[in-house]
Amino acid sequence: MSRRNYQPLPLHRMNWSDLSEDQVAQALQPAISGPTAPSSPSAVLTGQRLKIITDDGPTLEYDFRTARDLTLSENGGPAIATGYGALPSRNLVLISHMIPGTQRGYNLVVDTHHGLATVFEVSFSEYAKQETAAAEAAKRAPQFRMGRRNREVMRQVWFGVVDDGRSKPAERHVWTNRLEGKGIHWTQDDGTELLEFYLSIISSNFNELTRTGGELTFCSPSDYVMIDDHQFIYSRIESEFSGAFTLQVIDLFNMTQKGVRLGLTEKDLLEYRLFTGNGKITGQIATFEVFGNNADTRGARRVYRPIETFEIMTDAEAREQAINNAHAFGDGAGSGSSNMGGYKSERVTKFAGRKMVVRTDNGGPALDYDFVDDKKLRWRYSGDADWREAWYEMYEPDEDLFFFAHFLDAEYPRSCAMVAFDMKNGLTTVVKGTTGTPYRNNETSVSHHFGTFQTAGGPTPPLYVRHGWTDEMVGECVTWNYQRGNPGLTSMHFYTTPQSYSWVIFNPDGSGGMQWSSPGWYSKLRDGVYIMAWIEEACNGTLGVICYNSRTMHDAGFGYHLGTRGLTLNVIGARARHAGRFNIQQYVGIQA
């Protein structure tokens, strides 16, 4: 029987409750007993006292009475009794507890060998207060489109020392990029199996194979703290989803993790548990900071909130923009060179004056084409009497392999066709994008169609062979530079599963920055030449489709977007660098 729990909705589509503070307080009541765990609680701290002094933060004095009960004094205040859990890892101890009568708690990693400590103070029902203060400082409106986010765990990180009577060390645990570029497959002691990828110094990518089914990967703001060259602290907060907080101590010598997860589930129930896990490295890709930049002074961690900032349009607004403010390739003047098309290839003009018939299988679109000139074509659905005109642009990503795009019907919802055709074998792939999904009228939906084409002087197509789906790109990481300059407009694609991908926006110093992920689809046209399509769901709704040549490390593609400034069909053209590969195909896709 499969251990995978395929969810009916991905995390970014789930209706996470906008809970009141009182509802959160009610859900947190069991947390006072401390976290649960699959095994008996560790008694490593029983009978010990511990005083931690943080820099510019709290002073915490602990008395660990049993393996499950402690008392805490904050900043010299009265002692408070609460439950806790602890997990040892070599010279480190992870401690987690909440504070009675509050929505706050502490997760500590104590380094008994060096007398150091890193403290994560966590709290619920704090987003609205912090966002209001940030908005006032930035002189903007606060972001409450998705509610008050009381369920989201907020965190404050403090570095400090253990006051044990010895002289206090001058060093501290530090922010780090030493995990950046690494991927690990984890199997935890409760049977949870997941993939984690640390492609940034402020974010991470995770695929919960058993928990969510593993079809899609997701990204969350994250922290990375270095203990030494083989021990690290990693945390993430699922900010645009459940709001849950995960912290773990990673040991790269024996490939183990000791961690805690705190948050509210999709049923608004408390999840507060300790876990352990065993890992396997899936790969280490390149990083792009200058040598000697270790991210130990990284600055504030940013939180990417694409769901919060997504443009909301009414049906009437979407219809108006799609029908009356639609522009393809600058209406013949050309477009894309100043944005994501800064490295577009030479436009193909040699099909001007020629005709073509495209047929796709299984009831897919059948299209007749008349390329009037090098910018305008006429098209019709095969069998229709009337022709329609559209602007187009065409490129040649590989020898005698061509890729062009144009608007389809002027009715609403609007559509576009992106057509790849191979003059060596008569095969074609049509990617059709249409405005609107059940979730957002200004997102795009997509369909893929494989078939053949005929044109004068072209090859006779095969009867049965077709372009088709592939997983050959899964695990690849490729940087894309869209504009001249350093870094110019540059991002990194991570092709995560056969159904999804993730992108990383680089920080100014070349380190990995904010990330998001979306559904993605991969089809193979030739050896080393692929069509990759994605929809930036819950982000901006754009459909991007590129034909990627892994030999030339270049692409030819198109972007289709509906927003408050109109419907656009533009060029994508970028130069690529291969950053490495994760060996993850055995974990993703259909499992036997």
Image (cartoon, rainbow, N blue to C red):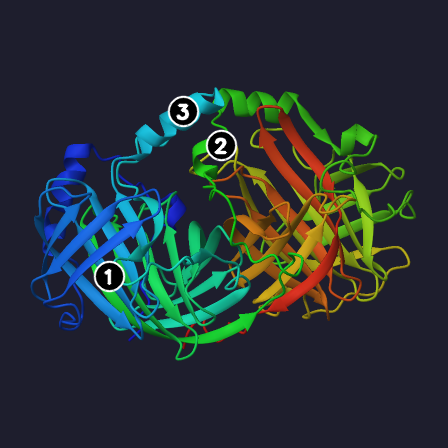
Identify the mark at residue 441; answer none if there is no mark. Answer: 2
Task: Identify the image quadrant of residue 555.
Answer: bottom right
Residue found at x 61% / y 70%: 472
Residue for badge 3:
142
Please provide percent x and percent y for residue 54: 31, 49
Spatial CA distance of label 1 from label 3 is 46 Å
Please provide percent x and percent y for residue 415: 62, 37
Q: Amino acid at mark 1?
A: Gly
Kindly indicate whether the residue at mark 2 contacts the one at mark 1 (C-beta within 8 angstroms): no
Q: Is residue 502 visible?
A: yes
Q: Amino acid at mark 2?
A: Asn
Q: For this rendering, which residue is in front, 99 or 440?
A: 99
Identify the mark at residue 536; answer none if there is no mark. Answer: none
Q: Residue furthest bottom?
A: 254
Callout in the foreground (1, 3): 1
Residue for badge 1:
165
Please provide percent x and percent y for residue 494: 58, 59
Task: Identify the image quadrant of residue 388.
Answer: top right
Label tally: 3
Judged left or right of residue 228, residue 521 is right
Determine the secondary structure under disc 1. loop
Mark 3 crowdedness (10 Å alpha carbons): few <14, some 14-19, many ≥20: some
Q: Amino acid at mark 3?
A: Pro
Residue found at x 59% / y 31%: 562
Residue found at x 20% / y 65%: 86
Task: Return the disc, 1 or 2, that comes first in the chain's sequence.
Answer: 1
Q: Quadrant of the N terminus?
A: bottom left
Q: Is residue 389 visible?
A: no
Q: For this rendering, which residue is in front, 271 or 294?
A: 294
Q: Quadrant of the C terminus?
A: bottom left
